[in-house]
Image: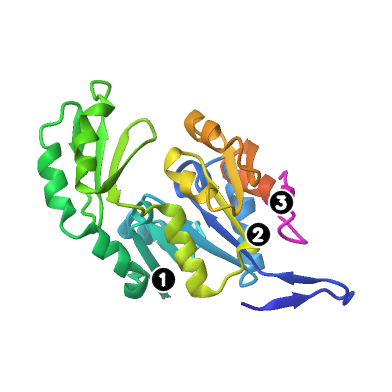
Amino acid sequence: MTQTQFSSGAEVRRDMVLATDLDGTFLGGSDADRKRLYAWLRDMAPDVRLIFVTGRDPAFIADLCRDGFVPTPEYVIGDVGTTIARVVTAPGKVAIEPITALEAEISATWADCGDRARALLRDTPGMWEQSVPFRYRLSYQYDATFRPETVDRVRELGVDVLISHGCFVDILPKGISKGPSLLRLLGHLSIPQDTVLVAGDTLNDLSMFQTGLHGAVVGGAEAELLAATKDLPRALHCTAIGAAGIIEAIHAHNLHPTPPEIYA
């Protein structure tokens, strides 16, 4: 990390880091909102750094960044915190490379839970496994016939069960989620926590706000997330949706001396 001295010589600014969820957050809001935030991030690089913290898998993230509209992050916390990776770019190529040392605890905690959890959940009414292959998690979708208590039995394996978005059930290694994995990455990179803004909109983002980092609960967030974060002093409940909510929070938390314009 570098530090930037203002021309007055009176103030020193540390770099800012945006650690953001994707769907409904970084990818949410109007085209104008996204373009404004994305342009600002590119203009401010490398002083403003970008980390994706998402339930999406590495292949999705690589495809997302290839067309050049969405800024490419330096790092990715993917698969609801079970992937910790660096992003490597070359002309026409974006690769997501897991950081083995940071994933060692995740791998050890997961062990052989996948096959055992899958066997327990087989034929659960109203729920079906997603077709995307995951390394250290299982992910299901559900419909209106699904009953949450039917997945309680899988907790006996020592895993966490996360129900979010009104349609997803994730089976995760115990204690592993977006927030703890982000803190592990920030520590690895020696990034000061006061420079970081986390942003999200659903219950699977809750652990990011529970870290105590500056937060943007963007407009339009799930009611469950709003309720769970209402007493967290740094979790700003934004009025603006998606990318505009992130801009709102950068201003409110005073994280950068030249933040993006609030309005186009």
The circle on residue 253 is 3
Q: Residue at x 16, y 45 (%)?
A: 117
The relative height of residue 223 versus residue 248 in the rendered view (above or below) is above
Quadrant of residue 42 within the rendered picture: bottom right
The circle on residue 86 is 1
Magenta region: 250-264
| Residue 259 belongs to magenta span | yes
Q: Nearer the viewer, residue 200 or 118?
A: 118
Left or right of 256, for residue 214: left
Q: Earlier in the sequence, mark 3 or mark 2?
A: 2
- Real-space Cα distance between discs 2 and 1? 22 Å
| Kind of element beneath mark 2 | helix
In percent of width and height, residue 220 lies at 55, 32
Q: Please state which of the two labelled residues, at mark 2 or mark 1, is closer to the viewer.
A: 1
Circles 2 and 1: CB atoms closer than 8 Å: no
- Real-space Cα distance between discs 3 and 1? 27 Å
